Amino acid sequence: FTLLAGIAAQTETLRVATAIFLLPLHHPLQVAERVATLDQLSGGRVSLGVGSGWNPLEYEAFGSSLRERGARMDESLGLLRRLWTERDVEGTGRFWRFPPLTISPRPVQRPHPPLWVAGNAPAAIERAARLGTHWLCDPVQTLDSMILLKQRYEEACRDRAVEPSWVLRRYVWLGRDRSTMERDFLPGFVNTQLAYWRVSTEGEAERRLFARIDAGEDVAPAEVARGRFFGGAAGDVI
């Protein structure tokens, strides 16, 4: 939030957002106040993109359990909406308990800053539809997989009479040219992301790709990143 506040202070029309913020690890009171303050500083230009994460170590570091992430997410999202729109809100849930209070400042946007819920697992997509939030599509999935996940999200919205609204995330590198990016940046980037991509892939094409890597095939970084990553000069990306 500190970085976003600095960006908001130097811009006038650019929307600032998190993508993603691990909401289940943080107290919703603190999150509500910080986002409302950022909304005031930006003049109503903030969106909160949240996810539940995948790494058990992150939950252990915060004294929690990965098994609780879904329940924590649901409870926190409900509290955020109430804290931004109501007064004398009391925390009476399984994870968060606090006396009746009213946060200040209040958000500029009404009824509250947009909530983007990330996730590609069926439970995460169902959550975005059930809660009526925007669905934030993770860049881990290729464009082909994204189309199938988008269809799943739209079907879940239709079942609940909710208007679908979604945000597409991709990895982007902007520089002098594509060849420089592929030589100097892409191999290291792909290497650091492989573990995350491996546990987060949903499609058969991605599973076949990782099976080739596991079998010892020297798969080019550009092929591994295809559909997830856009890089090069501005004309290569836009």
Image (tube, rainbow, N blue to C red):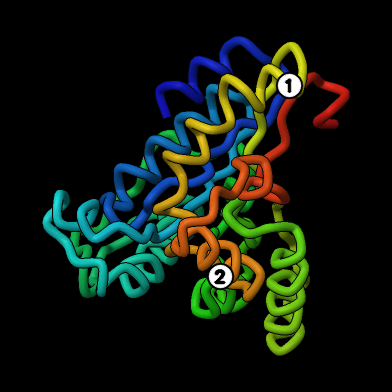
Rendering quarter of residue 192: top left
Farthest residue in the bottom direction?
159
Q: Residue at x 37, y 72 (%)?
A: 70
Name the side, left or right, on which 227 lies relative to 193: right
Kindly state the secondary structure of the residue where label 2 is placed.
Answer: helix
Q: Residue at x 49, y 79 (%)?
A: 123
Q: Of the residues shown, which amino acid type is indicated by label 2?
A: Arg
Choose between 196 and 13: the one closer to the eye.
Answer: 196
Choose between 187 and 144: the one closer to the eye.
Answer: 187
The mark that comes first in sequence, 1 or 2, is 1
Rendering quarter of residue 151: bottom right
Name the side, left or right, on which 174 lies relative to 130: right
Instruction: Identify the disc placed on residue 152.
Output: none
Instruction: Identify the disc placed on residue 207.
Output: 2
Q: Position of residue 69 (x, y in %)?
A: 32, 68
Q: Is residue 114 above or below residue 172?
A: below
Q: Mark 1 sits on what residue?
A: 179
Q: Of the residues shown, which amino acid type is indicated by label 1?
A: Ser
Q: Position of residue 157 (x, y in %)?
A: 71, 79
Numbered marks: total: 2
Choose between 28 and 171: the one closer to the eye.
Answer: 171
Kindly state the secondary structure of the residue where label 1 is placed.
Answer: helix
Q: Is residue 138 visible?
A: yes
User: How far is mark 1 from mark 2, CA to CA?
Assistant: 28 Å
